[in-house]
């Protein structure tokens, strides 16, 4: 690793290793399995799967024949499994990891495996595909120029409220995963923290026959979620918090008065309020002085 933190594969034998490949799988529509991923699976010596049964169903449905050894790699065994997979790559085998659905390492196993492969100077590559988070964001109609993926919220109401409170003023679109039976309650929590008028969208069964996207205010989405029995994977997208209105000169002057009343010197108070509000420190100083 050089000073910039970049790994360089100086060893010729290491350069010749087939990379550990993280391969995306469909989130519902078999047609989203790319030709590249099919070829990667055909050529693999070892396929590490989050769910081996789902993998076998996928291979059968897609008509992919492989002689690979299929092993299980999930959140409960990934520490031990990662070491074995890295050793397999080192021995010259072609190793592929596939999640149950979607992009690997996004709320799925694969992150730890990637970290440990990089630390071991093992080449890593991705055969990309569909992502539920990005698909829902695009379908939501909410701003896509800046966004943050938050994954699953805590199950306990208090912990959930704390996480949401920390995001209340976030000016990026927010993407959450949720289970169908907790969706209505989560939307209710969002109303309490983000406000009932905050725009959002709920996507379910993405890329499947019963794909559905509901758009509206959070209060409208609570009513929508409570009116039906939700099934399938759920993605909630919440729009950015509205930008705060700039303080008027009178409001800024009131802040100066409060600071001075609390014992702060007038010059220091006007300087600090000017920084926060964008108003002229000199004008605030003169106005406050004229009142005294």
Image: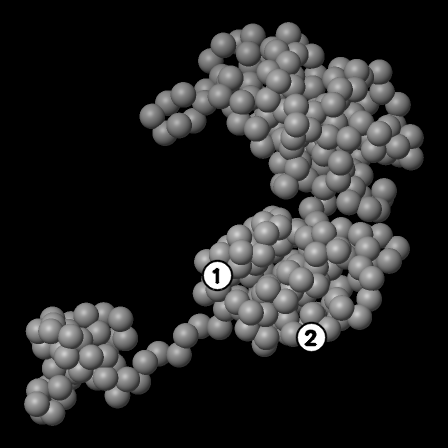
Left or right of 112 in this view: 140: right
Vertical position of residue 272 compared to residue 75: above or below: below
Judged by depth in the image, the label closer to the viewer, 1 or 2, is 1
Q: Which mark is residue 165?
A: 1
Q: Is residue 104 visible?
A: yes
Q: CA distance from mark 1 to mark 2?
A: 21 Å
- Mark 2: few, some, or many residues within 10 Å (few <14, many ≥20)? some
Measuring from the top left, give residue 177's x and y in whole percent.
66, 51
In terms of secondary structure, where does tag 1 sit?
helix
Q: Quadrant of the N terminus?
A: top left
Identified at 49% across, 10% down, the residue is 11
Identified at 49% across, 73% down, the residue is 242
Vertical position of residue 150 compared to residue 71: above or below: below
Residue 215 picture quarter: bottom right
Left or right of 89 in this view: 225: right
What residue would you read off at disc 2?
220
Vertical position of residue 214 compared to residue 43: above or below: below
Measuring from the top left, give residue 162's x and y in whole percent.
49, 56
Identified at 50% across, 68% down, the residue is 241
């Amino acid at each position: 690793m050089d000073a910039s933190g970049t790994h360089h594969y100086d060893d010729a034998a290491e350069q010749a290793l087939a990379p550990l490949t993280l391969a995306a799988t469909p989130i519902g529509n078999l047609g989203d399995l790319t030709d590249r991923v099919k070829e990667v699976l055909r050529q693999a010596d070892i396929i590490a799967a989050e769910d081996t049964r789902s993998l076998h169903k996928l291979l059968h449905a897609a008509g992919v024949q492989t002689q690979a050894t299929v092993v299980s790699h999930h959140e409960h065994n990934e520490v031990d499994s990662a070491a074995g997979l890295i050793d397999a790559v080192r021995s010259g085998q072609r190793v592929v990891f596939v999640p149950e659905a979607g992009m690997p390492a996004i709320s799925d196993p694969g992150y730890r495996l990637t970290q440990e492969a990089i630390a071991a100077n093992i080449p890593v590559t991705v055969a990309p595909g569909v992502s539920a988070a990005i698909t829902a964001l695009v379908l939501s109609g909410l701003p896509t120029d800046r966004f943050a993926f938050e994954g699953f919220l805590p199950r306990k109401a208090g912990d959930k409220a704390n996480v949401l409170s920390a995001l209340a003023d976030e000016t990026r679109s927010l993407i959450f995963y949720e289970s169908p039976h907790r969706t209505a309650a989560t939307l209710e929590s969002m109303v309490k923290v983000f406000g009932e008028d905050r725009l959002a969208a709920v996507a379910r069964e993405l890329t499947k026959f019963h794909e559905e996207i509901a758009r509206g205010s959070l209060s409208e989405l609570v009513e929508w979620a409570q009116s039906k029995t939700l099934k399938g994977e759920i993605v909630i997208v919440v729009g950015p918090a509205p930008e705060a209105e700039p303080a008027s000169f009178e409001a800024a002057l009131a802040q100066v008065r409060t600071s001075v009343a609390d014992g702060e010197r007038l010059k220091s108070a006007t300087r600090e309020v000017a920084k926060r509000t964008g108003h002229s420190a000199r004008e605030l100083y003169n106005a406050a002085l004229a009142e005294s």
